[in-house]
Image: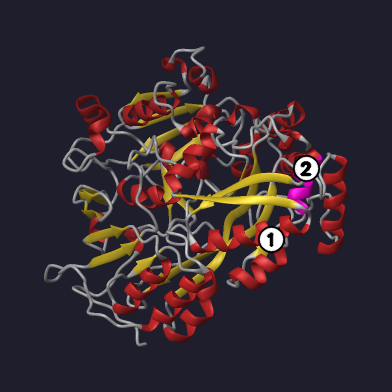
């Protein structure tokens, strides 16, 4: 899942001024919480583009939608997969047929949640008219790929309602990771009765129908999204928080100050290089943990210029000083990356690496100059390229570091910063040369990272990498029922994209959240999933850090 990290760019001087202002106190501005109720004020990085689970694709969208909606499976407080709308399921011996038995559950308007709502949702994702970015995830359903390509009717897709509370999924290949995958928002049900009535406008407040622990009350663009406890949720009696306001908080230093003043209880990101300061001035607030997220350089191989040359791609990637970025710029536990699948990923093999891993930076940069010379670039004819990134302080600093590294090997790079929605629209349209982005695991398996480079993936294969040998390896892994053998094949596939310089991994990220000590139920986990149904706080609360 793509992760935008947005705010207006700061110069070094402005950044220093913002840090200096970090300790300023102002009057607490916190909405009144009804007597006896529990309310959370939640900083969610950026404004979502949509709350439609079949159309969403960004982490900030998933956070809110995951509190409104629930799939067949869901996440426990520690991120583990647990039953959601499905109470139980069984699998055929060949692993191709899965039968899910749904619990008795209601939509927020009181209508029953049925197996047909899942069938309707899955067909909606795969319908080429929807244009869902995540359609490729559902192509593991029988005839899913053909339906998306318009070569098979949607009715032929392997999702069938045997009765109102029994859903049968038929797969193209075995997928032992399916329960994990089903937590992804593209597999959430859709309220067929609401979508048919309102069309795409069903996601507006007053029309939005949800089956999760919360229901949508209001959405003021650029200001806040408000949800309240869904009284029809099957486990509503154990949901502690009654109301949540989600705010866009793209200015990380400003968000940090709001948490310190008690205006916000949680923010999903803080500026990485402020961790030591935060731990000193706000003890107990900073939460960091290994995360299934890789920051990487993507290069547009569709561009008719020099980036089609693997020597140029290799020179750009290997000349980046990953140790400086992680140890000097970010300083929150990030790790230099020389492969793409992050450590801690389930069912993954350790071993794939770039062909230049282990060499010193000086050796890598000397080799990069030689490769560029072979490709026809040098002091008299420098390579000139543009690198796009999000308008976030961390992103800006990383881009400036990469720009300096490239300058050291004779590359003239111009940084172009964009708001996240614009950046990812450009990436999907291939309107870029190079870009610094990151990918967050949609589910805990190597495939969520490696599927990005498959030819059929489409929009999220930003660099347009295409290699029949790579596609064949992923196809072989799909047919493999032995977990160890599958891991070996996926490792071969990862090694291939690294050798082909299809991607330039830069660092493995850590999750960085600020959580008021008065908020309970927050469990750090590798997937960084923290559904609000597990959180609690004192009624009518208003936290304040001592600064």
x 22%, y 60%: residue: 243
468 shown above or below 547: above
Is 387 displayed left or right of 201 in the figure? Answer: right
- Dot 2 falls on a residue whose secondary structure is helix
Question: Which residue in the structure is indicated by mark 2?
Answer: 312
**Farthest front residue in view:** 380
- Asked whether residue 358 appears in the rendered view, the answer is yes
The residue nearer to you, when weighing 546 against 408, is 408
- Dot 1 falls on a residue whose secondary structure is helix
In magenta stretch: residue 30: no
Q: Main secondary structure of the magenta part?
A: helix
196 shown above or below 65: above
- Mark 1 surroundings: few (<14), some (14-19) or many (≥20) residues within 10 A: some
- Asked whether residue 360 appears in the rendered view, the answer is no
Tag of residue 166: none
Question: Which residue in the structure is indicated by mark 1?
Answer: 404
- Mark 2 surroundings: few (<14), some (14-19) or many (≥20) residues within 10 A: many
222 shown above or below 275: above
Q: Measuring from the top left, give residue 325's x and y in whole percent.
A: 65, 65
Of pointers 2 and 1, the one earlier in the residue sequence? 2
Residue bounds of the magenta highlight: 311-318
x 44%, y 43%: residue: 422
Q: Measuring from the top left, give residue 317's x and y in whole percent.
A: 74, 51
Q: CA separation, marks 2 and 1? A: 17 Å
Q: Measuring from the top left, give residue 27's x and y in whole percent.
A: 22, 79
The residue nearer to you, when weighing 490 against 132, is 132
Nearest-to-viewer mark from 2 and 1: 1
In magenta stretch: residue 314: yes
Is 466 displayed left or right of 91 in the figure? Answer: right
x 51%, y 63%: residue: 525
């Amino acid at each position: 899942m793509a992760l935008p990290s947005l705010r207006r760019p700061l110069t070094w001087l402005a950044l220093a001024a913002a840090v200096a202002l970090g300790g300023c106190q102002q009057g607490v501005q916190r909405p009144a919480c009804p007597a006896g109720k529990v309310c959370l004020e939640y900083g969610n990085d950026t404004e979502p583009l949509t709350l439609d689970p079949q159309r969403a694709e960004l982490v900030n969208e998933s956070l809110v939608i995951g509190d409104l909606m629930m799939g067949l499976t869901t996440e426990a407080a520690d991120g583990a997969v647990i039953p959601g709308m499905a109470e139980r399921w069984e699998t055929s011996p060949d692993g191709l047929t899965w039968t899910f038995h749904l619990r008795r559950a209601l939509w927020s308007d009181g209508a029953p949640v049925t197996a047909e709502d899942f069938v309707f949702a899955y067909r909606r994702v795969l319908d080429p008219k929807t244009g869902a970015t995540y359609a490729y995830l559902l192509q593991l359903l029988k005839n899913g790929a053909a339906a998306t390509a318009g070569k098979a009717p949607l009715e032929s897709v392997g999702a069938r309602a045997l009765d109102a509370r029994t859903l049968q999924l038929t797969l193209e290949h075995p997928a032992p990771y399916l329960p994990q995958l089903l937590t992804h928002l593209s597999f959430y049900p859709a309220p067929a009765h609401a979508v048919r009535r309102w069309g795409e406008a069903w996601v507006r407040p007053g029309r939005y129908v949800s089956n999760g622990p919360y229901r949508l009350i209001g959405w003021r663009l650029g200001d806040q999204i408000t949800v309240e406890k869904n009284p029809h949720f099957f486990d509503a009696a154990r949901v502690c928080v009654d109301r949540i306001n989600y705010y866009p908080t793209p200015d990380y230093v400003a968000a940090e100050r709001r948490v310190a003043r008690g205006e916000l209880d949680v923010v999903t990101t803080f500026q990485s290089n402020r961790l030591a300061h935060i731990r000193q001035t706000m003890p107990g607030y900073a939460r960091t943990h290994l995360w299934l997220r890789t920051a990487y350089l993507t290069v547009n191989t569709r561009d008719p210029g020099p980036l089609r040359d693997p020597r140029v791609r290799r020179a750009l990637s290997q000349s980046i000083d990953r140790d400086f970025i992680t140890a000097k710029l970010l300083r929150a536990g990030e790790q230099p990356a020389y492969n793409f699948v992050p450590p801690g990923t389930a069912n993954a093999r350790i071993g794939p690496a770039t062909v230049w891993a282990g060499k010193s930076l000086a050796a890598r940069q000397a080799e990069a100059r030689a490769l560029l010379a072979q490709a026809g670039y040098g002091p008299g004819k420098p390579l000139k390229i543009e690198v796009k990134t999000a308008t976030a302080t961390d992103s800006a600093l990383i881009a400036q570091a990469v720009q300096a590294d490239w300058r050291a090997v004779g590359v003239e790079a111009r940084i172009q910063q964009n708001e996240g929605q614009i950046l990812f629209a450009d990436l999907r349209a291939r309107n870029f040369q190079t870009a610094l982005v990151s990918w967050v695991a949609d589910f805990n398996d190597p495939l969520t990272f490696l599927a990005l480079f498959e030819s059929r993936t489409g929009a999220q294969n930003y660099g347009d990498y295409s290699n029949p040998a790579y596609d064949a390896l992923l196809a072989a892994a799909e047919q493999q029922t032995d977990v160890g053998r599958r891991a070996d094949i996926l490792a071969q596939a990862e090694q291939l994209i690294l050798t082909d310089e299809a991607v330039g991994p830069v660092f493995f990220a850590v999750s960085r959240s600020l959580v008021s000590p008065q908020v309970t139920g927050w469990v750090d986990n590798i997937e960084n999933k923290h559904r609000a149904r597990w959180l609690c706080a004192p009624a009518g609360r208003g936290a304040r850090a001592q600064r």
